[in-house]
């Protein structure tokens, strides 16, 4: 018989709650959507958590997302599936902040330092750990690349079979990464929501567990650790504004949940960040719904952007994203691919930080929001970079020279940086 965990190892979950109706159902069971077809949210006995965990106790633990285990659903420590999920750094952009006269400062939460090189490791570490705890033998999901890589890695670590369905134009490096880490990969002539239809069909036919975004309750719990970490790293004082690259929106929803839980624990006050959902102009269903005052976002037709991670034409958690944005007094904003590409290069050249395109979209969105007066120079800003820029194809570069031929070195003497214009 498996040993029962102590309170420090888990056991604080009380219910699974329908995100739309509030209907509660028992935990410790394999769960997908609620009876209404909406995402389920994990609820905890926060009073017990408050008695068991304090910020001073937290300081003594290793710098891993599992340091927050009382606020995570895995009950038995032997079911934790880990690849070394370290706390990710907060990096300042001092040169760009000076140019933009951003006196409140600009910080980047660099999620590219996680296993599999992206923030998807957080959600899939929890989803796979819970799948292991609940006896799952196979899992499947649609993915634009990074989530599939994370599922493949953690499932292989847990001894669980995995199946990943990707749009056929997913970057080859992602496809090979997913396959290399043990998943069966399928390429679909369509977008990610069409890939999801194949996952749902296979779920009915083969019985694999569907780990699609928000179709199980545990990826949110992994993603919420981004918010828990941020609060701890800033001394339990949150920034004024968070810019988050938003496709399926699990991370934005998860962080907003984290902040609510921290307030209930008394670790932070009522003031929370304004949450900004950043999308690409070629795929901006949340922006359109936000500006129209709607709670749901219809499918965005002909979605296109080279920032593949935010090319999600329809999100099952649309109302949760929009609620978080509105409750926080934030907004949704779209930036075009040209602005994303320029931001990508600007941050790399000026700060030495190679973002992913989706992360670059948050910097482009910040500049646009400043120009439109939606944020001020004095506000403290955090941008989320969701993956390592090394996972993405970069523009061609390099100047050819011929060995043995003389070079006029003086031609390079005045090739300094071009001053940036705010």
Image (spheres, rainbow, N blue to C red):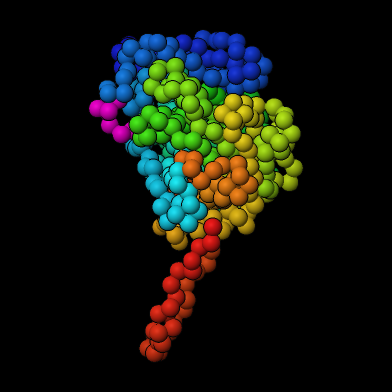
**Coordinates of residue 334 in the picture (x, y in percent):** 64, 45
- Say which quarter of the image contains residue 142: top right
Q: With 44 as the anchor, is 244 left or right in this view?
A: right
Which is nearer the eye, 272 or 134?
A: 272
Relative height, residue 162 to residue 400 (above, below): above
Which is nearer the eye, 137 or 376?
A: 376
Relative height, residue 14 to residue 199 (above, below): above
Q: Residue at x 56, y 29 (%)?
A: 328
Which is nearer the eye, 272 or 48?
A: 272
Per the picture, the main secondary structure of the magenta-coloured stretch is: loop
Would residue 103 be visible to someone looking at this image? yes
Residue 392 highlighted magenta (yes or no): no
Q: Residue at x 49, y 69 (%)?
A: 418
Would residue 210 be visible to someone looking at this image? no
Q: Which residues are magenta?
A: 58-65
Q: With 405 as the anchor, is 421 left or right in this view?
A: right
Count up the numbered dots.
0
**Coordinates of residue 122 in the picture (x, y in percent):** 44, 34
Q: Residue at x 39, y 42 (%)?
A: 90
Q: With 35 as the anchor, is 4 left or right in this view?
A: left
Q: Residue at x 42, y 51 (%)?
A: 93
Which is nearer the eye, 240 or 139?
A: 240
Q: Which residue is the extreme one toward the left? A: 60
**Coordinates of residue 105 in the picture (x, y in percent):** 44, 45
Rendered-image quadrant of the N terminus: top left
Rendered-image quadrant of the C terminus: bottom right
**Coordinates of residue 88 in the picture (x, y in percent):** 38, 40
Relative height, residue 39 to residue 338 (above, below): above
Relative height, residue 346 to residue 369 (above, below): below
């Amino acid at each position: 018989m498996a040993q029962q965990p102590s309170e420090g190892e888990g056991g604080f979950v009380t219910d699974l709650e329908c995100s739309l109706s509030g209907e509660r159902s028992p935990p410790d069971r394999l769960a997908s959507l609620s009876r209404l077809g909406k995402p389920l949210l994990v609820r905890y006995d926060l009073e017990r958590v408050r008695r068991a965990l304090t910020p001073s106790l937290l300081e003594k633990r290793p710098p891993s997302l599992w340091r927050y285990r009382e606020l995570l659903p895995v009950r038995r420590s032997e079911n934790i599936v880990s690849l070394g999920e370290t706390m990710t750094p907060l990096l300042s952009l001092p040169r760009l902040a000076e140019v933009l006269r951003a006196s409140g400062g600009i910080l980047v939460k660099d999620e590219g330092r996680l296993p599999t090189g992206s923030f998807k490791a957080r959600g899939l570490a929890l989803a796979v750990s819970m799948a292991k705890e609940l006896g799952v033998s196979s899992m499947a999901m649609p993915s634009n690349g990074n989530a599939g890589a994370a599922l493949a890695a953690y499932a292989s670590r847990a001894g669980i079979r995995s199946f990943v369905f990707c749009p056929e134009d997913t970057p080859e490096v992602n496809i090979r990464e997913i396959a290399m880490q043990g998943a069966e990969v399928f390429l679909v002539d369509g977008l990610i929501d069409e890939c999801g239809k194949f996952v749902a069909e296979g779920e009915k036919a083969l019985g694999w567990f569907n780990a699609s975004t928000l179709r199980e309750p545990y990826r949110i719990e992994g993603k919420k650790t981004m918010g828990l970490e941020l609060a701890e790293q800033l001394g339990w004082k949150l920034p004024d504004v968070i810019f988050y690259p938003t496709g399926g929106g699990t991370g934005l929803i998860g962080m907003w949940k984290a902040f609510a839980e921290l307030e209930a624990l008394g670790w932070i006050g009522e003031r929370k960040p304004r949450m900004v959902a950043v999308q690409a102009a070629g795929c901006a269903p949340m922006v359109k719904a936000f500006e129209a005052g709607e709670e749901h976002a219809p499918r965005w037709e002909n979605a296109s952007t080279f920032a593949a991670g935010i090319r999600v034409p329809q999100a099952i958690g649309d109302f949760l994203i929009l609620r978080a944005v509105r409750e926080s007094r934030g907004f949704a904003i779209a930036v075009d691919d040209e602005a994303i590409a320029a931001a990508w290069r600007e941050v790399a050249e000026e700060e030495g930080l190679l973002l992913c395109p989706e992360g670059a979209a948050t910097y482009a969105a910040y500049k646009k929001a400043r120009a439109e007066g939606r944020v001020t120079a004095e506000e403290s800003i955090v941008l989320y970079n969701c993956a390592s820029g090394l996972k993405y194809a970069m523009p061609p570069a390099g100047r050819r020279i011929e060995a043995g031929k003389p070079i006029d070195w003086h031609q390079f003497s005045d090739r300094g940086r071009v001053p940036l214009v705010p």
